[in-house]
Image (cartoon, helix red, strand yellow):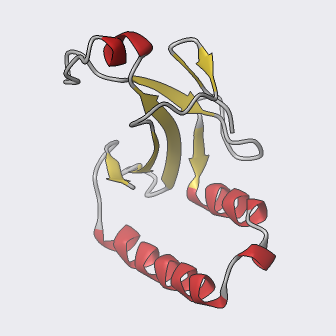
Amino acid sequence: MTWIVDGRRDDTPPGGALIIELWKNRKSEDYSVRLYYTAQTLEQMRSTATLSPTNPPQRAPIFLPGCSKEDFSCTWPEFSNAIRQAIDPRYVSLRSKSRLSHFDHLTQLSLIKVSLQDKPLAKF
């Protein structure tokens, strides 16, 4: 993954965050995921500017190879597959694996219950 915020490539300043948005299309009932990186600019940090809707941190969409389309979205199955392919199971403990299975189960239940038209369902 790569991003450019405030002219800085792949820089992770204090307070930077990876945002994962889950969207549902009400018409097709399909889910999609969009990734963003957000961080305050150097000027915002230097001036200790208060971040707000009128003075937000910069936000850069992230293209996930093998998944993202032109609008940077991934379908839920493609996103799930890309993430699973990127994780080497040798470095995931059995405890973490059971949590991932539990997360998958909860995610499926949550996806069934939540329905918003063209709005992010969750940021985590």
Q: Residue at x 65, y 90 (%)?
A: 94
Out of 83 and 17, give the one closest to the viewer: 17
In this view of the protein, which residue sits in the foreground, 55 or 23? 55
Q: Is residue 2 above or below residue 101?
A: above
In the rendered image, residue 28, in percent from the top left (x then y), is placed at 46, 53
Which sits in the foreground, 22 or 56?
56
Going by the image, does 79 lie left or right of 25? Answer: right
Compared with 36, 120 (above or below) is below
Q: Quadrant of the C terminus?
A: bottom left
Q: Which quadrant of the rendered structure holds the N terminus?
A: top right
Vertical side of 49 occupied by 27: above or below? below
Residue at 35 percent across and 72 percent down: it is 110
Left or right: 42, with 54 as reference point: right
Image height of 55 relative to 73, above or below: above
Q: Position of residue 79 (x, y in %)?
A: 63, 55
Q: Nearer the viewer, residue 95 or 46?
A: 46
Residue 2: x %, y % from top left: 67, 32
Q: Position of residue 35 (x, y in %)?
A: 52, 41
Judge from the rendering whether residue 116 lies leftward or rightward of residue 43; answer left or right.
left
